Image (cartoon, rainbow, N blue to C red):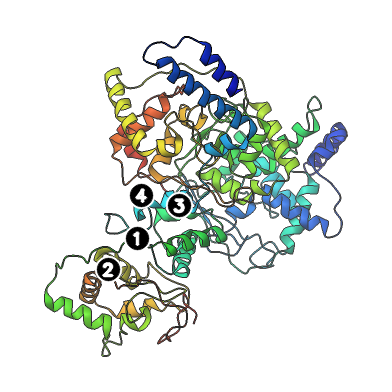
Amino acid sequence: MSDVMHRTCAVRPVPRGGRWARACGALTFATVGLLFAIGMPMAPAMAQTAPDTMAARVEACTPCHGNRGEGTSDVYFPRLAGKPSGYLYNQLLAFRSGRRKYPPMNYLLEFLPNAYLQEMADYFADQRPAQPDPAPITVSDDILQRGEALATGGDSAAQVPACASCHGAELTGMEPGIPGLLGLRPNYVSAQLGAWRYGTRTATSPDCMQPVAAKLTEADVTAVAAYLATLPAPENAAPLPKGSYALPFPCGSAPN
Amino acid sequence: MRPMLPQLVIISALAFTAPAVKAQSNTSNTGGDIVARGEYLARVGDCIACHTAPEGQPFAGGRAMQTPFGALYTSNITPDPVTGIGRWTADDFYTTMHTGRFPSGGLLYPAMPFASYTKVTRADSDAIFAYLKSIPPVRQKNRSHDLHFPYDNRELILGWRTLFFREGEFKSDPAKSPEWNRGAYLVDGLGHCGMCHSPINALGGSSQADAFKGGLIPMQNWYAPSLTSNREAGLGDWSLKDITDLLQAGASKRGVVFGPMAEVVHNSLQYLTDEDARAMAVYLKGIAEASPKAPPASSLPGSESSLLISLGKTVYDARCAGCHGVNGEGRPPHWPPLANNQSIDMPSAVNPIRMVLNGGYPPGTRGNPRPYGMPPFAGLLSDNEIAAVVSYIRTSWGNRGMPVSAREANELRAAPLD
């Protein structure tokens, strides 16, 4: 058929400047396209459906968490990229059931099946967008030192374990359920510690984070959140494999 | 005499509708079949949605139902003999479903859709009861209701019943097909679609004359569109396939379900057999009244609305066109078309505004286990931008809705999400 079109074009007078020739060429191209479409009826239908990718499926997450889970300018919405998928899955379950309360999240997840939430968790766990730059320091050296002491050594008098004792020496977390603490803004970390202190954020029993947060003072929360935000991301920010180290006490979200 | 009356009605109904009985239910009530059939029917009736608290045991009740009259707490319908319905008989269960009265004679609050369940056949009621007797008993005491004065006085229900309740099982229409009648039985009876899709008046009731005419769902601030007007969710010009896709999968070429309807599809309609989904579709298509598209009428001054719409196009092209297409054509079924989409241009703008504000995922179902979600724009767009983009999609590509104001958008920011 396209041959016929060529011949038809050829016998027509070609105006100076070749405009007709170009139009005829375009027509031929369109005809080839039409033949292709008739020959493969699925092709145009495919072009009109949504892409069959997880990136397209999690579009609803991106205004708050960024296209690849890197976070956005809103300091209360956390980075998701690279957190252990077991941790992300636990959070998705907790938001879906309403155990973890944030109405916009509760609403979005309410009718999604477990297998699909696991896929979403896997998707964001696998993303590796660049780590953010460390936050500018806005607190005094004393406060930062207190934060560093809590994060790396804990406070034995107050029976507060070091963050590193559960979240890993590099604070990158451990599969399957312990999140890394780097790349998060201080506002987010202190809001979450506050939520644990007041019991509005809970995890599967034994809820290991609850007694830890309960022993922190408000000043401790400020200090540790500020310190964590100043740390640069390590070369490899991936969580450690399951069982890389023993937890100091049992944790419902992270069975060892 | 009174106890005799319902039985007479049943007998006469059976006598008149014998050829269509098959359209209502398979009435064999023996063996393990009855439990499986009861489980299916309990899903069609969506009992679990209200009778289960968040993170609670299935059917153990305790879910708060917020009403304009205060909070009602649903009851434990597991077979626990002390706190559930373990001591009930099939007669007790049927009486409650059919008459809206407890076995003791006490009156049920009409949050329990007994005005619909009264249409359920005795055989189906018995099957549901057999299923509920088969589930694990849960010992959980019912919580007392928390209603404002004077609604805490149950005697007031008598007045409501006089106005809005007509007791009686479903009667087939011999002029219609068995499939239409089966659909009517499911939609008007167990499916209790009218609980949301009929307008609710100030007394918390809906009149027969207004059945399926649509209305704002109290407390939830979602608009349940009319099932009879083709300008709303009337399905007169939908194909049966698109209707059954919407009911069973939650997504169709014409649109996807969201808001409270997502819950209904998730808990109930996705489990419909193909035959029942088709019967509902036939009936729903049948009750749609032809209603010509109304000419657009603006509640905003002309110059203001044209400014809004030009801002709306800018917002749309930047934020929405990537999925919904520059001409609102979408990429159905997952990215729904906005052109010629009834839920966009129907008279109430509540749903399109809320979709832009809150986004949402259709339910994950057997037919659509990995749904695509709409992003929430509440944090990204101002009231003015939301009003503008909603006005744009309501008036473009042949849509004939009215523009909306920034104030309407602002008011819905406070709408509850649970």
Camera-nearest label, 1 or 2: 1
Q: Determine contact: label 3, label 1, CB under 8 Å.
A: no
**Residue depicted at x 66% and y 29%:** B285
Q: Residues within 10 Å of mark 1 (few under 14, many from 20)?
A: few
Q: Are marks 3 and 1 on the same chain?
A: yes
Figure check: B326 above or below A165: above
Q: Residues within 10 Å of mark 3 (few under 14, many from 20)?
A: some
Q: Are marks 1 and 4 on the same chain?
A: yes
Residue assigned mark 3: A55
Question: Mark 2 falls within which chain?
Answer: A
Task: Report whether B354 appears left or right of A30.
Answer: left
Residue assigned mark 2: A190
Camera-nearest label, 4 or 3: 3
Figure check: B133 above or below A150: above
Q: Residues within 10 Å of mark 2 (few under 14, many from 20)?
A: many
Residue assigned mark 1: A129
Kind of residue at badge 3: Ala
Kind of residue at badge 2: Ser
Mark number, residue B2: none
N-terminal of the pair, mark 1 or mark 2, is 1
State the separation of the CA atoms marked 4 and 3.
13 Å
N-terminal of the pair, mark 2 or mark 3, is 3
Kind of residue at badge 1: Pro
Q: Quadrant of residue B326?
A: top left
**Residue depicted at x 32% and y 22%:** B300
State the separation of the CA atoms marked 2 and 3.
30 Å
Figure check: B142 above or below B179: below
State the separation of the CA atoms marked 1 and 4.
16 Å
Where does the image place residue B184, in percent across and percent down from the top left?
A: 71, 34
Camera-nearest label, 2 or 3: 3
Q: Are marks 1 and 2 on the same chain?
A: yes
Where does the image place residue A47, in percent across and percent down from the top left?
A: 53, 38
